[in-house]
Amino acid sequence: MRKTRILFFLLVALLPFVGFCGNDLPVLLGSFKSMKQLDHGVLINADNARVEVLVFSPTLIRIRVGRTEFQPEFSYAVIQQASGNFKNTKETPDSLVLLTDSLQVVILKRPLKIKL
């Protein structure tokens, strides 16, 4: 019983350090480089990432972030295909605003941030 308690306390004490063992450090997205209009959304290229924002309906969008080309779409949660489009797209020197009937997506350019 005493050994079990000691092992439990050691485990609890060492648990916060488990996440720091890997070599993968967070990578910031960087700054906005370019935007490409897609059939049902936009593809944004940044310094260190690609961001895809797809419209499924006026109240449902998908945001994908990756370092390389995106794999074909797959989701357990969303069973339909992207079918909508942004009602309006406004680009300023500092941001990109994407609007549906119900949602507003603001993409800040430097550094790249996404606000819903």
Image (cartoon, helix red, strand yellow):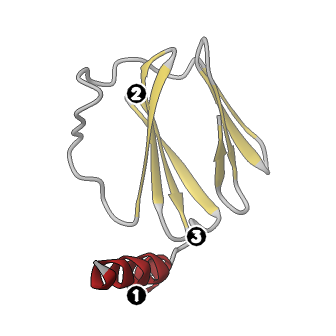
Residue identified by numbered label 1: 21
Q: Identify which residue is drawn at 34% across, 65% down.
A: 68
- The residue depicted at 33 percent of the width and 83 percent of the height is 2
10 Å crowding of disc 3: few (<14), some (14-19), many (20+)? few
Q: Position of residue 59 (x, y in %)?
A: 51, 16
> Which comes before the other along the chain, label 3 or label 2?
3
Q: Quickly name the residue at label 2.
A: 40
The image quadrant that residue 24 belongs to is bottom left
The residue lying toward the viewer, choosing from 22 and 70, is 22
Q: Amino acid at mark 1?
A: Cys
Judge from the rendering whether residue 82 lies leftward or rightward of residue 47; answer left or right. Answer: left
Frontmost residue, 67 versus 85: 67
**Real-space Cα separation, disc 3 to disc 1, in angstroms:** 20 Å
Q: What is the three-letter code of the residue carrying label 3?
A: Leu
Mark 3 vs mark 2: in front: 3
The amino acid type, in three-letter code, at marker 2 is His
Could you tell me which residue is drawn at 43 percent across and 79 percent down?
9
Frontmost of labels 3 and 1 is 1
Callouts 3 and 2 close, C-beta under 8 Å? no
